[in-house]
Image (cartoon, rainbow, N blue to C red):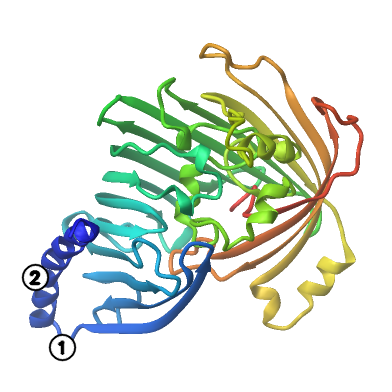
Amino acid sequence: MDRFYFLIPALIFITVWIAPVQTAAQSSSSYELIPKPDLWYNDVDGIRVGVRVKGQVPGTFDDGPHRLDAGLWLSTWFPDLPVSYYASYTNPIDQWSDFGSEASYQFITSVRAGYHRHGIAFNKRWQEGFDERRYRELSLFNSFEKRFDHEYAAFPQLWGSESKLLSTLTGELKNNNSLGWYKIDASLGVQYLNEFYTQFHGSFIQNVEFHEYWGLNLRLFTGIASSNADPEYMFSRSSAPAIQTIYSGVTRAKGTIPQPWMESGKFQVAGGAILRGYTGQDIETFVNNDPDAFVTPFLMNSIASVNAEFDYFNPIALGFNRIPYLSEFLSFRSYLFFDAGRSLELFDNEPDNLYADAGAGFSLSLNIPDYLGKPRGFVFRYELPVWLSEPGMEDSFKLRHLFSFGAVFSL
């Protein structure tokens, strides 16, 4: 019976959800549930077979009351926990909502890829008129979370195993100025169970467009985690903190991206400081193929970085822009990049080195914006970090190959 304790949050969720849906059915002609099959893969579940269900009041198109997003899956390799699920129920707060500026409460519960996540959120958005590109958003999420099966993690050393009771406040602002579009986002989290700790990260992105094919993107990033924070909230030089991998189906469990790619040091998951040239060095410390030789992951409790990309004309990009219809969603970029960062030296034993890299890159992105105009799709990058300020045992100047998932600059 202990195996099925994970169903308790799901039953609570269903109880909480049924009453509002019944109310909706009484106040409107109907409530529709739209199912669709779903297949996915990872190295623990094998092929995961299931169904996704979207629930809404007809005709509201993700913008109405009683919105449901849920999924239920069965693992064909039958691990210890072969059934997984996700469910989210969102309902607007009419008194605090206006067109494009919704306030809402949200219930989330999920048990998948060896990770518990159950909580309630309050969300508020402020949008300037009908332009969804200019907005401010604020969210407060209170949750219980726990990594209960490390077999799903691509790098188990980057995860703690203690239960966490979290309060996370996030904010985001997007607008434009005389230079171009800019975005500011920040997150502050507090963990209460066992050892109390906090974690913060924030970034500022500025786009400067000189011409349709020429431009400059700048990004500033800062991250701080308490000295006793779980490793999933700490910062590597090159990639996203491990906690951020649970928010994408591509990175949630090992094997969706082949594990040999991840361990090769030539594949990066965007996020954090994004000193992309140091991916190989960081991954070497994450992989422990010898159980008798424990290697401490290279992680820092504090870091600050700057990323810059200079876009230049490329005839391939011109070709993409001339493809009818497809060019609205598909884009190709060529750019030169420079990254630099270092620890803030707020904690003992943090390195005082300045880490920098430079090179050239190409990216292919497919973006189908959601109803709020936010990016929804994928970005693949191929980059050549040809110079490192701290090359380790290598030469500073060397041709290195790096494949990446996720955008450095998301506007």
- Element under disc 2: helix
The x, y position of residue 363, in whole percent, is 74, 59
Query: Which residue was labeled with disc 2?
Result: 19
The quadrant of the picture occupied by the N terminus is: bottom left
Front tag of 1 and 2: 2
Near mark 2 (Cα within 10 A), the count class, few <14, some 14-19 or many ≥20, is few
Q: Which residue is found at the position 40% from the left and 69% from the top?
A: 78
Q: In this view, does 282 lie above or below 327?
A: above
Q: In which quarter of the image is residue 190?
A: top left
Give the mark nearest the N terminus, 1 or 2. 2
The x, y position of residue 357, in whole percent, is 79, 34
Given the image, on which type of amino acid does mark 1 rest? Ser
Q: Is residue 74 visible?
A: yes
- Element under disc 1: loop
Decide if residue 9 is on the left or right side of residue 372.
Answer: left
Query: Which residue was labeled with disc 1?
Result: 29
Q: In this view, does 288 lie above or below 381?
A: above
The x, y position of residue 71, in whole percent, is 34, 72
Given the image, on which type of amino acid does mark 2 rest? Ala
Q: In which quarter of the image is residue 10?
A: bottom left
Decide if residue 310 is on the left or right side of residue 26.
Answer: right
Q: Which residue is found at the position 50% from the left and 61% from the top?
A: 374
Residue furthest top in the image: 348
